[in-house]
Amino acid sequence: MSYRETEHLRVLIANERSDRLALVAPIVAALGHEVIAREIEVEDVGPVTARERPDVALVGLGESSEHALGLIERIVKEAACPVIVLLHAPDPSFVKEASKRGVFAYVTDVDTDWQGSIDIVLRRFAEYHDLEGAFGRRAVTERAKGILMERHSVDESAAFAMLRDHSRSTNRKLVDVAAAVVDGHRLLPKDPAASSSHAP
């Protein structure tokens, strides 16, 4: 991820204190980003996040840690973006609870390089999604191999060879072939002989 990709972001800021929102918004704008939403209420932040699809969300710790944690939970549930917590001062117990809810980083009032923190978080978030995608692709491939092993009475290496060979012969990605097997296997008969018994 290059600097160019992180120089103009759509940012959601959330805090239970409107005075803190008013302080954070100009800092975000001064970094060259657009504040797309300012949210105070926990029940509002989820729908706004889903609708606006921010690049990054900044959640401030106000008077109530439970309120801030509620904001974080709703944003993480709805967003395909990282969440950064804004703190007045280091607060290890809150950071621990926030990390359990999916926060990627935190910055304090004494931190001067917010953009550096945002850049690091976006890179780590992209890596996390790449890794999550790799695990997902592997899971689909494993399921497809299991289906082929059952239907064709072959071992794992033969099932993988079937996927690989079909991928090459059709010029499709292996994961796409695996997904087609997984998606379509319920349409196939359990017993290969059953399909011939229905033939005219």
Image (tube, grey):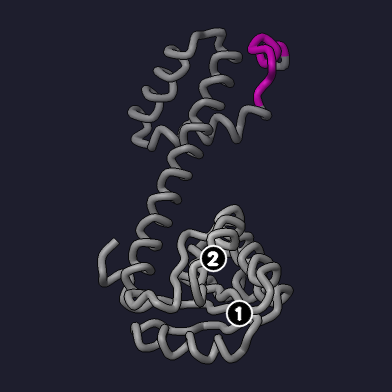
**196 within the magenta span:** yes
- Which quadrant is the N terminus positioned in? bottom left
Residue 176 visible in the snapshot = no
Q: Residues within 10 Å of mark 1 (few under 14, many from 20)?
A: many
Q: Amino acid at mark 2?
A: Asp
Front one among 177 and 28: 28
Please state the horizontal and vertical placement of residue 106, each as a whole percent of the image.
Answer: 47, 66
User: Element type at marker 2?
Assistant: loop
Q: Quadrant of residue 188?
A: top right
Please state the horizontal and vertical placement of residue 109, each as a whole percent of the image.
Answer: 44, 78
- Dot label at residue 74: none
Q: Residue at x 67, y 29 (%)?
A: 187
Please state the horizontal and vertical placement of residue 60, each as a whole percent of the image.
Answer: 56, 76
Residue 46 shown left or right of residue 57 in the figure: right
Q: Is residue 157 above or below residue 24?
A: above
Q: Is residue 84 above or below residue 194?
A: below
Q: Quadrant of residue 166?
A: top left
Range of residues picked out in magenta: 188-197
Q: Which residue is mark 2?
A: 91
- Which quadrant is the C terminus positioned in? top right
User: Element type at marker 1?
Assistant: loop
Residue 7 visible in the snapshot = yes
Chief secondary structure of the magenta span?
helix
Q: Residue at x 71, y 11 (%)?
A: 197
Q: Amino acid at mark 1?
A: Asn
Residue 134 shown left or right of residue 15 in the figure: left
Q: Which residue is mark 1?
A: 15
Q: Residue at x 40, y 32 (%)?
A: 174
